[in-house]
Image (cartoon, rainbow, N blue to C red):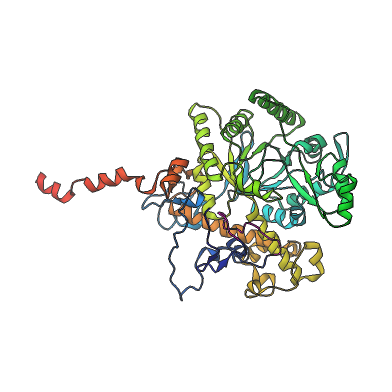
């Protein structure tokens, strides 16, 4: 097993727990006092692109990321000359070809394009209580930045206040809160995506959303996710609530209506009960049956009035991967999100998360291979988003390059939730009257935050950028977590711009697989990406073997 370093002295960051490929701790706490790279970037933004203590230090790479097959074993190529995709109105001069001029805006979709300012989107934030608690800062932050956010599965089903009868929703306050929070600051960039699983379909989520919000929402069908091979899960600590969920039609384990379970609950031997979702397609036994069922579901959603439909699939094997790409393309979907093993935002069985499915980088490499087969046949290929343990700006670049030109977005789960926690904790200390409302976990600012100041204006590097966007009057309504989300996005954007400029690609559409290479032979073999010294080696040898121009001139004379 690869062991990632827990500390980075150059950036002055540290992981509280065991770090994983993304640079996040394997267990990310909402009350964390710091300070991994994503946590610190949510405060100081693009400053964390650089080593600390400038003018007093020198810094060199640790080069510890080239073992095994992972996104960290891909490296980004840089070029000596040229510039491609220079934004309109600019020249290819050295004055114009600077990294702040790199355009990170893009779009996805088939019949109707959806624009975004940065090529990233959130993971599905569904019925887990932590997603509900921090939805406001996450949604406001995503809307301000201009990226899509996903309302995950089961939000209506677990809502005690929701009213459902015979698959028809008459009231869904939690789902309404989530959609309306995002739409309040939506300015045409990004999207609100509502995901559906088996229970959501039975509960009539699609019908409710289209009737109330029309084409303001993208509806997403769900095949699976990278964190677990069974449906979505939560844990509840109320026996009464567990019984309510069972009556709502969920799989609840252990059964809260069994007398012995209730007795164990009363005595504290059992203090939580898990709610599970059903597996999809269990009644179907062949690929043809799956395809027919999927196409009928898409057709039904279109008849309801949905103009934008997407699909989320998990880290199943190659058969399911090919089915998702082929069927989503044939159905003219707007987006296919492919989630590799390694990520996860909710409650997944730990050893299942550790041992099931296809790791992200391998799954994504095969997704490109299959998409290219379709494209070479002249068939339409659905726009794709890659997900699964991605967190940094180099991950964004590498994922876009690995799947180019089919990959339009990088889906980031836990990393985009961190600023919501952090900002809420800071807000609860600075404005104690709202501590409970914003779910703040701190009683005072820890040293890791206090070193930057004692007010939001002092702490968040992105504070005045947000204020410029919304105005001084509206700024009082912006959650600190949203300011932190903006600040993190600013760092990721600037870092992506720098990497793109170094690769001489000044717009997203110019990024190709030629911009990355494999740091070891195993990664090259498993991803189809050329090994470092093999790339352009033939060109290099031609340069070396070419005749000296001066000598050739003398011979002519």
Q: Is residue 180 above or below residue 422?
A: above
Reply yes or no: does residue 487 show up in magenta. no
Residue 129 in the figure: left or right of residue 111? right
Percent across and percent down for residue 324 are 61, 33
Question: What span is colored magenta in the figure?
Answer: 18-31
| Residue 313 image offset from top left, x and y in percent | 64, 38
Q: Position of residue 107 (x, y in %)?
A: 59, 43
Name the foreground residue: 230 vs 263. Answer: 263
Of residue 333 and residue 316, the one placed in the foreground of this image is 316
Q: Quadrant of residue 448?
A: bottom right
Q: Residue at x 43, y 71 (%)?
A: 58
- Residue 519 lies, with reference to residue 384, above or below; the image says below
Q: Residue at x 63, y 40 (%)?
A: 314
State the image coordinates of residue 133 (x, y, percent, origin top left).
77, 56
Q: Residue at x 73, y 36 (%)?
A: 279
Viewer-nearest residue: 438 or 510? 438
Is residue 471 in view from this perspective?
no
Residue 242, placed above or below residue 336? below
Q: Is residue 519 above or below residue 437?
A: above
């Amino acid at each position: 097993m690869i062991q990632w370093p827990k500390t980075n002295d150059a950036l002055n960051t540290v992981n509280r727990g065991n770090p994983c490929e993304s640079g996040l701790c394997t267990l990310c706490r909402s009350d964390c006092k710091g300070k991994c790279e994503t946590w610190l970037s949510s405060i100081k933004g693009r400053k964390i692109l650089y080593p600390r203590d400038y003018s007093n230090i020198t810094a060199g790479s640790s080069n510890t990321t080239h073992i095994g097959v992972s996104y960290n074993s891909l490296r980004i190529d840089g070029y000596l000359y040229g510039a491609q995709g220079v934004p309109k109105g600019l020249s290819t001069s050295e004055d114009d070809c600077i990294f702040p001029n790199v355009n990170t805006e893009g779009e996805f979709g088939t019949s109707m394009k959806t624009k975004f300012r940065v090529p990233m989107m959130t993971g599905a934030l569904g019925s887990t209580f932590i997603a509900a608690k921090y939805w406001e800062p996450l949604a406001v932050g995503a809307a301000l930045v201009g990226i899509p956010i996903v309302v995950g599965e089961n939000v209506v089903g677990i809502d005690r206040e929701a009213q459902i009868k015979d698959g028809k929703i008459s009231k869904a306050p939690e789902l309404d809160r989530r959609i309306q929070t995002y739409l309040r600051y939506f300015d045409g960039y990004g999207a609100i995506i509502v995901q559906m699983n088996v229970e959501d379909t039975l509960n009539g989520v699609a019908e409710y959303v289209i009737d109330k919000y029309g084409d303001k929402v993208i509806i997403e069908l769900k095949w699976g996710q990278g964190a677990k091979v069974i449906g979505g899960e939560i844990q509840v600590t109320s026996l009464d609530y567990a019984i309510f969920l069972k009556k709502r039609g969920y799989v609840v384990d252990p059964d809260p209506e069994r007398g012995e379970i209730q007795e164990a609950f009363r005595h504290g031997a059992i203090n939580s009960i898990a709610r599970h979702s059903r597996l999809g397609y269990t009644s179907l036994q062949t690929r043809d049956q799956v395809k027919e069922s999927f196409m009928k579901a898409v057709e039904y959603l279109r008849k309801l009035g949905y103009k934008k439909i997407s699909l989320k699939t998990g880290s199943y094997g190659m058969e399911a991967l090919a089915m998702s790409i082929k069927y989503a393309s044939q159905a003219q979907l707007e987006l296919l999100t492919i989630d590799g093993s390694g990520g996860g935002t909710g409650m997944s069985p730990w050893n299942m998360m550790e041992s099931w499915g296809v790791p992200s980088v391998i799954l994504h490499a095969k997704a490109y291979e299959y998409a290219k087969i379709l494209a070479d046949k002249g068939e339409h290929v659905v726009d794709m988003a890659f997900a699964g343990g991605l967190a940094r700006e180099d991950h964004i670049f590498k994922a876009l390059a690995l799947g180019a030109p089919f990959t339009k977005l990088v889906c980031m789960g836990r990393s985009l939730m961190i600023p919501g926690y952090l900002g809420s904790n800071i807000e609860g200390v600075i404005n104690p009257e709202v501590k409970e409302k914003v779910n703040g976990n701190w009683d005072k600012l820890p040293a890791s935050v206090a070193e930057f100041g004692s007010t939001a204006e002092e702490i968040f590097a992105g504070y005045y950028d947000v204020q410029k966007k919304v105005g001084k009057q509206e700024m009082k309504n912006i959650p600190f977590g949203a300011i932190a989300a903006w600040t993190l996005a600013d760092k990721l954007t600037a870092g992506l711009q720098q990497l793109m400029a170094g690769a001489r690609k000044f717009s997203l559409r110019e990024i190709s697989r030629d911009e990355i290479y494999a740091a070891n032979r195993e990664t090259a073999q498993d991803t189809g990406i050329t090994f470092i010294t093999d790339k352009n080696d033939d060109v290099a040898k031609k340069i070396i073997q070419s005749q000296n121009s001066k000598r050739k001139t003398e011979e002519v004379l």
